[in-house]
Image (spheres, grey):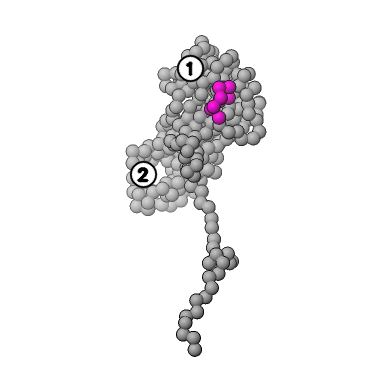
Amino acid sequence: MNSETQIPPVPPLLGAGNEGQMEMSVQTQVHHYTAKVKFGKEVVDQINEEIDNVSIPNRSQKDSQLVGQFRHDERSAQLDLDLETEVGQQFKAVLNSAGTSYLKNAYKKDSYADCYNVWSNHCFGGDYNPLHEHSTRTAPGLSGFMWLKLPEEMEERLLKGKNHQINFNSSVGQYDGWNHMIWGLGSKTDLYRLKLPCEEYLQPEVGTLYIFPKWLHHQVMPFFGEGERRSLGMNWDIIDTQSELTKIMSPSEYENFVSQIPEDFDRTKLYNISVAGCTLLIKLDEIDNSGVTIK
């Protein structure tokens, strides 16, 4: 009788190639979302007419409230867009719908976006917007920009179709007047180390609106030559619902929140609270203080 232990042969790939022996999935770690909305010529023309006929004649300057360095032309300016006019009200409704859709589809939030200020940027040769972020009245908030008019030379440089590779090793002015979005610090070597990009250059395209979280840093590169680069900037407050708070608060925190709502509070109005130093606006339209659903 052979007393030596028989060692079974090692299967190829340790058997990992057999059904059910090895599974793999790739998990995406998302840093943030942006939304891109494209409007047709009819919409753009109406907004430009509103600016030409209302904003420019009234000249309600926002220069002292914004960081834009617009001073190289007598027409350089940042002007309020009146949201109380007929066009302003309609545009606000469109922006609120887009912002709310962005919150629901990107962040799965049961919240509403309320656009409360819009302004036009009138840039001419040499003007630029330095690196900055926006602020809103609520701790969470959205910001955006939309291109309305481009200089002829910039239109001619449009890179249509395929994605392009950023190349600053030439001086042709390819990125003059472009928007630059930054959400981290990095270098080109980081790409070799499997770090994802933390910046993006956006080519202006008339009629295109971008929506993003208010903390996202961005800037506008200067351009040179004739013509106007006209765009809009805007901010949205975020209004949360009680159901949204249940996703963030612990049960005890939520119970404490509900207990502090005054019994006589008018629930048709927004409820203002401060959580960890953050101002939140809450729409109290789902449950009363006792937890009973309001029909």
Precedes in sequence: disc 2 or disc 1:
1
Q: Which of marks 2 and 1 is in front?
A: 1
Q: Where is residue 164 in the image (x, y as percent from the top left)?
A: 60, 33
Given the current orientation, which residue lies at the most extreme bottom position?
A: 1
What amino acid type should be assigned to the residue bearing mark 1? Phe
Residue 148: which disc?
none
Q: Which of 119 and 11 is in front in this view?
A: 11
Image location of residue 163, percent across then percent down: 61, 35
Q: Name the residue under label 2.
A: 261
Quarter assignment of residue 217:
top left
Observer-nearest residue: 128 or 20? 20
- For the point 49% across and 36% down, the residue is 188
Tell me the quarter of the picture where residue 214 sits: top left
The answer to whether marks 2 and 1 mark residues whose Cβ atoms lie closer than 8 Å is: no
Residue 203 percent location from the top left of the image: 58, 28
Q: Looking at the picture, does residue 221 appear above or below residue 113? A: above
Q: Residue at x 37, y 53 (%)?
A: 251
Is 41 placed left or right of 59 in the picture? Answer: right
Label 1 element class = loop
**Residue 108 magenta-highlighted:** no
The residue labelled by disc 1 is: 70
Looking at this view, name the residue that lies furthest to the top. Answer: 74
- Can you say whether 115 is above or below 121 in the image? below
Q: Report the amino acid beneath label 2.
A: Ile
Judging depth in this view, the residue of 170 and 108 nearest the camera is 170
> In this orientation, does residue 114 appear?
no
Q: Position of residue 48 (x, y in %)?
A: 60, 21
Range of residues picked out in magenta: 167-175
The crowd level at tag 1 (other Cα within 10 Å; few <14, some 14-19, many 20+) is many
Pick the residue in front: 86 or 18. Answer: 18
The local crowd at label 2, few if under 14, some if 14 to 19, many if 20 or more residues have their Cα within 10 Å, is some
